[in-house]
Amino acid sequence: MDIIGHLARTVTPAVLADNHNPQNESLLKQFYALFIAKLADQESFTRVGSQEIHRDDLGLFDRLWTDEGQKNHIAEELAAHNNVDTISVKGLIASAAPLAFNEIKSLAGSVPIPQFLRDNLESYRNHIPTWATSVLPAGLLGLGASAAGAHAAHATTTNTTATPAGHRISDTTSTEPLVREEKESGGFLKALLPIIGLIILAALAWALLKGCQKDPAPVATPEQTVQQPAEPAVTGNTALAPAVLSLATGEGNELFACRINAGNEELSNTIMTAVKDVFGTGGDNCRADIDDGFATDMPAAPHLAAILPLIKNTPNANVIIEGNDVRIDAPDQAQLDKLVADIKAAAPELNVVATGPVDFDAEVKQSIADATTAMDNLGENPDPKDVARALSLQVINFAVDKTDIPAENQAVLDRAVEVMKQVPDMQLLILGHTDSDGDDAYNKDLSQRRAEAVKAYLVSKGADAAKLMTKGMGETDPMATNETENGKFRNRRIEFTVYDESVAGMDTPITVTPSDSADIKAPTAEATTEPQADTAQ
């Protein structure tokens, strides 16, 4: 039974849609093998087996792999071995997991999913990458081989109608599930069973009689055959988000935008110094968000002295250095290819990729999944900065020139209202941003209206209007160059930041709506602490 092939025919077209290419198809096959192997482990399956898994359940992968270090390792390795950027990988596997789960459930039929997958171990064992043993339960790949062989010896081959490529899961009703059917064992084996039973009983009786002939010795505990869970490997700060340096160059090779996320002052200063050494006083505008939720090391840090001059020499380049990944975007394809090649040569151990065209749906889905996970991890009495970061992770994909909150974002905002009620003293500033398309004044107004729309939605769900401020930034605070679609996408966003840490030094007033103008004095301020991610557009 070719389970991987079946998923490639049915799930892959639904996940990739029009974004088919050999790299994406290959990484999904590798993910299917990992996903199947994880579900074959009873303890892992128990985490999700009793839940109703819908086909759009983008949090399934996170619930199945609860270790942040393992999740990051999977995404990074799939990215590195298939020349795909990590963000795209995370979006693909988040979308593929619920579809694959439901397809596997259909294939298993009445057989428990872990047993079904262990019985068919040989159909996917060879698809599991060698690097993946650290993210799978210890001993899993060694289990079930004999059982699989025994079942194969007594099972009939099931003919399966393949689903034509390009059909989505919902269109595969004509595809028969690959269910296992076992035929009845032969009469000779049936005849042996009573004899075997008598032999076992006789052996037990002899052992009892022998034990009664002398004083009983202490009886050893029978050896347990239950597999013991492996001790978790010590991987250091596995739950921390990677340190990030995000920067963009302008038309004249100046530093156009710069953000740093770091776990301590030491790493932040190291990165900042490297930026200033190359870009001079332009580095003074580089913003740093220092928080113990970020890693205190960056694999690329020792290479910044070699990497940054290459970036500076490429006009209108967007570069994100995150953990072990370097993602690059530039409008000139020849210059982009050269920059990728040059950085690979300067730092061969880093995963350097050119960012492909924006998959808006995948980016939005992944951002919502990330925000949902971050909200889940807030715990009781969360730090307001962590709340702001969690909310800023989601991409609010407004329609062109519109302010309506998309339905897919509402669940995260609803959760935010409940969190706000738990932290009554928290005040948040909602910042609206646009790209550079259109008139400056119009963009400023549009960004203000979108920020106010987010506030209005939160208030409609029970948030205290007096504790939510808004400010439209227009195109004045970019995260990336506007010369590429990727850059424009990142610049169109909604950000949340903590109000009391953001008001110092603002030279334009924050808007206070009429409903709360009597309660709050509108200060003059500008955000100085930057939320974590590329956020809503």
Image (cartoon, grey):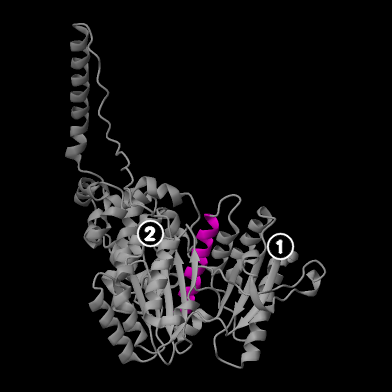
Q: Secondary structure at mark 1?
A: loop
Is residue 521 shown above or below 343?
above
Is residue 52 shown above or below 397?
above
Circle nearer the N terminus (2, 1):
2
Residue pictured at 18% horizontal, 24% vertical: 199
Residue to which mark 1 is pinned: 463
Residue 330 appears in view: yes
Say whether residue 334 is magenta. no
Is residue 50 shown above or below 512?
above
Query: In the figure, is residue 94 to the left or right of 140?
Result: right
- In the rendered image, residue 499, in percent from the top left (x then y), is placed at 65, 66
Answer few, some or many: residues within 10 Å of disc 1's Cα (few below 14, many 20 plus, some between 14 and 19): many
The amino acid marked with disc number 2 is Lys
Seen from the viewer's position, the closer of residues 385 and 422 is 385
Residue pictured at 28% horizontal, 79% vertical: 343
Query: In the figure, is residue 194 to the left or right of 398?
Result: left
- In the rendered image, residue 500, in percent from the top left (x then y), is placed at 65, 64
Q: Secondary structure at mark 2?
A: helix
Residue to which mark 2 is pinned: 71
The amino acid marked with disc number 1 is Ala
